[in-house]
Image (tube, rainbow, N blue to C red):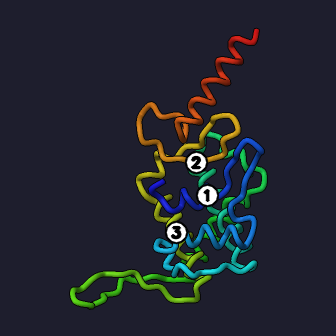
Amino acid sequence: MPFLSLEFVSTVRADRSGPVDTLSSVGGMTAWAREHAAELGLDESFTASEELRRETVRLRQAVRALFARAVTPEPPSRADAADLPAFEEALALVNATALAAPTAPQLRWTGAPTLVTASTGDESARLRGRLAAGAAEFLAGPERALLRTCQAPRCVLYFVKEHPRQEWCSTACGNRARAARHYREHRK
């Protein structure tokens, strides 16, 4: 997935045993953040706290609410549609979180000049700020028009449609959907 915001909302997914939440524990949150350390402005020794995990999950639910709104009139992801915050509340949280850790381009000059993004605030605010800003940029960008909900059985992911005939987030989901359709049609 090329977009951090899609990676973020995909921390809720489904497998054969049911829904899986990557951010359900401090260890899971730490591992996910370390995996995306460069994008989040963290060093690889980052360790999450329970408070950060809770706040990050709250932000994820807000971003998922905005994604649910963005795919309308398609249905939202089945993972947590009933548990999402109201649209206005979600929008306010994403915007406030992005503002809490403002970023600005900075020039570094070590041998040759390079442009880096610097942000203020502590590590927790930076992490959540980058996630919120990434979601805002994605939802305001041209890719939003291609955002879809995978309708394969048991799948709960959002994806960006990369081909005009793409209906599912992955080949595996397409195979599962076709097998389910075949079973329904030939069960009679």
Q: Residue at x 46, y 74 (%)?
A: 38
Toward the viewer: 124 or 46? 46
Q: Nearer the viewer, mark 2 or mark 3?
A: 3
Give residue 36's mark.
Answer: 3
Q: Quadrant of residue 155?
A: top right
Q: Look at mark 2 in the image and give the residue it sits on.
A: 158
Toward the viewer: 54 or 83? 54
Q: Residue at x 41, y 37 (%)?
A: 163
Residue 123 visible: yes
Q: Nearer the viewer, mark 1 or mark 3?
A: 3
Q: Secondary structure at mark 3?
A: loop
In the rendered image of this protein, does residue 135 appear above or below residue 153? below
Q: Residue at x 27, y 82 (%)?
A: 114
In the rendered image of this protein, does residue 79 appear above or below residue 22? above
Near mark 2 (Cα within 10 A), the count class, few <14, some 14-19 or many ≥20, is: many
Toward the viewer: 177 or 143? 177
Residue 128 in picture, x, y percent from top left = 59, 75
Viewed as shown, does residue 139 lie left or right of 116?
Answer: right
Amino acid under disc 1: Val
Circles 2 and 3 in contact, beta carbons < 8 Å: no
Q: Secondary structure at mark 2?
A: strand
Give the CA separation, mark 1 to mark 2. 8 Å
Circles 1 and 3 in contact, beta carbons < 8 Å: no
Viewed as shown, does residue 83 lie left or right of 77?
Answer: right
First in sequence, mark 1 or 2: give its number. 1
Q: Look at mark 1 in the image and give the residue it sits on.
A: 9
Instruction: Return the residue found at the far top.
Output: 188
Circles 1 and 2 in contact, beta carbons < 8 Å: yes
Residue 107 in picture, x, y percent from top left = 30, 87
Amino acid under disc 3: His
